[in-house]
Image: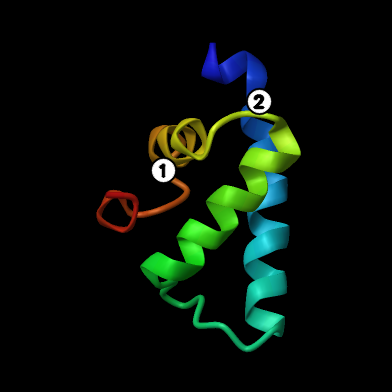
Amino acid sequence: MGFVLVPARQLDQSFTAKLEAAAAGGLQTDPPTVPVIDRIARSLAQDFCVSPKMIRTRLRQDRLVDADLLD
């Protein structure tokens, strides 16, 4: 279900854009911190109309974020 609600290509594009915006805003993104990833996951959840938990799962499945940052 997560692959239908949160398609891989759109997730990758949206995640990259939000990570770049966070970096432009002065947040640490290389490597990203847990609070930055949490903030991005909450924002993506709103964009895709799903729970932040689903976004974290998809970020883990697509290996967009180190699993240690999602727990």
Q: Is residue 19 above or below residue 42?
A: below
At a point 46% along the width and 78% down the height, the residue shown is 30
Quarter holding residue 18: bottom right
Rendered-image quadrant of the N terminus: top right
- Say the numbered circle drawn on residue 50: none
At a point 51% along the width and 76% down the height, the residue shown is 29
At a point 32% along the width and 58% down the height, the residue shown is 69
**Badge 2 density bin: few <14, some 14–19, many ≥20, Cα 10 Å:** few
Q: Which residue is mark 1?
A: 63
The type of residue carrying mark 1 is Arg
Q: Which residue is mark 2?
A: 7
Q: Residue 11, position in %: x, y?
A: 65, 39
At a point 56% along the width and 83% down the height, the residue shown is 27
Q: Residue 64, position in %: x, y?
A: 47, 48
Q: Is residue 64 above or below residue 29?
A: above
The type of residue carrying mark 2 is Pro
Relative horizontal placement of residue 37, taking residue 49 as reference (left or right): left
Marks 1 and 2, the one that precedes in the sequence: 2
Relative horizontal placement of residue 51, taking residue 47 as reference (left or right): left
User: How far apart are labels 1 and 2 at the CA level?
Assistant: 14 Å
